[in-house]
Image (cartoon, rainbow, N blue to C red):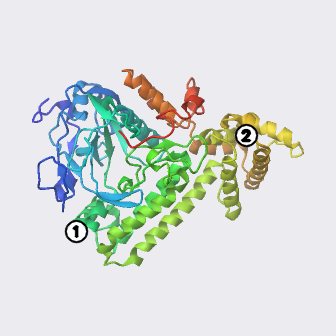
Amino acid sequence: MKTDQRNTAWESLTFDNRFTRSLPGDPETENSTRQVYEACFSRVRPMNFKRPQLVAYSKEVVQQLGLTESLARSQQFASVFGGGDLLPGMDPFAMCYGGHQFGNWAGQLGDGRAINLGEVVDVNGKHQTLQLKGSGPTPYSRFADGLAVLRSSVREFLCSEAMHHLGVPTTRALSLVLTGESVTRDMFYDGNPKDEPGAIVCRVAPSFVRLGNFQLFASRGDITTLKRLTDFTIRNDFPHLGEPSPDVYPEFFAEVCQRTAELMVHWMRVGFVHGVMNTDNLSVLGLTIDYGPYGWLEDYDPNWTPNTTDAQGRRYRYGHQPQVAQWNLAQFAGALLPLVDNNVEALQSGLKLYVESFEDAWHSMMVAKLGLESFRGEDDQELFGDLLDVLVLAETDMTLFYRSLAELPCESVDETASADEQWNRWIETMGQAYYAADKITDETKSKSLEWWSRYRNRLQLGGVSDQQRQQRMNRVNPLYVLRNYLAQLAIDRSEQGDHQGVWELLDVLRNPYEQQQGREAFAEKRPEWARHRAGCSMLSCSS
């Protein structure tokens, strides 16, 4: 396919490149690493790989873009989303932004291994940016090559779609393509590099603008570009707020705060740990963005981080994510200050809204996870907190705990039964959630039974039947999540040329809340062999 020819199979892709049309671009055309000033992007073409091969695609995203599955299975599709062929209307570019990394200002960062092909209008009339990750270097690649490997690309592809089907706001993934070339990576930065298969994920989102886009221009005192970017974002992604003005900027900030608070509650609900919550990895739209060394909380440990780089400080641990998001938003507020005449109070209400929104959403989320009818104040707060304390007393699989709890009878319990009899009834249903049920201490038993008794009383107070409770709980507590070891098994097969594991796992994750006949193995606890295996526990940023 030539870049100046239109194939009828692609005619449904209508490009409307608002970002490059409306915002200032880098005047330099050479694709060399450099500092880029007074520009929101640099135009750059993806590398032309000679043997692109499709690994998988999302049929839902294919349909959303108005394409067909027959096209998605074609070599043309692999060539386009493997970066080699450009369609008419594409205007490839890499975004310029900065950010705080692990709490420290890092200056200019930008799309170092991501190239946006352009913006299309989907079947719902909404703009979607098509972005290739791993398609070659950009002016923002610093010392890297702009490429990605299969293992990280499988993880990004699967997790993007898994999160969507869980109901978590997220960027999407259209396709996963092998480049046909090897990429050298040192997976754990320990001096043992090796060649791995190269791959490219096509990511899809209404916008990939993140907090760091605004921070960079503010840090440089480039208020003109900061204002242009902010006004563009409000007009295109927050049009309901009205025409940009000093009065609207605080409303824009407040809505970003609210969306971010809701996103954090979703992450906590399903046990997702992002692993690298730098300000350049937080979406202005409140989407989960940039799937790197993420992880799924299997045994409940609020101090767990999946990122080897974060192993010492644990800044991005599971239980700290809401606080980190608030800190990131405070840095975002600092970037917007010049637009509100440095009126700090104008933006403080947004940060207050973040706290209030998170607390309200957290209470609603826990009510739903426990199948209650409504939130009843301090007593429920204590019930929620004590449950989380119980979960850390023994190695407990978070996902299976809540699914098992939905099955635990609470209406017909003999209150006069001995502690041993009550424990036997508890463990009969809840035992599958424990990694070592035979080693549970007496303290864990007594505190678990004490909490169960209070939970039963709370259900009775609200008039909640076991049937009602189970239905409510199973709507928000998934049975199938992208456990690290499941992703690694799919990667192992894919690296050997068998991509069926990716397809099968993708299909399971499409219905995370419904029990799927014959797929019980996908809902099991992490096996012992995966406890410390690379890719199944902690990961690095290497991709």
In the picture, which quadrant includes the C terminus?
top left
- Residue 407 falls in which quadrant of the image? top right
Residue extending farthest front: 191
**366 on left or right of 35:** right
At which x and y percent is residue 195? 32, 29
Q: Which is nearer the eye, 198 or 115?
A: 198
Q: Position of residue 539 (x, y in %)?
A: 45, 40
Q: Do we see residue 53 in this rendering?
A: yes
Q: Nearer the viewer, residue 128 or 267?
A: 267
Q: Nearer the viewer, residue 126 or 207?
A: 207
Closer mark to the observer between disc 2 and disc 1 = 1
* Disc 2 to disc 1, C-alpha distance: 59 Å
Residue 104: percent from left, percent from top: 38, 61
Q: Which mark is residue 408?
A: 2
State the image coordinates of residue 355 (x, y, percent, origin top left): 52, 65
Task: Name the residue tied to disc 1.
Answer: 222
Q: Judging from the image, what secondary structure is the residue with disc 1 in?
A: loop
- Taking the spot 55% from the left edge, 58% from the top edge, the residue there is 361
Residue type (three-letter) at the residue carrying disc 1:
Asp
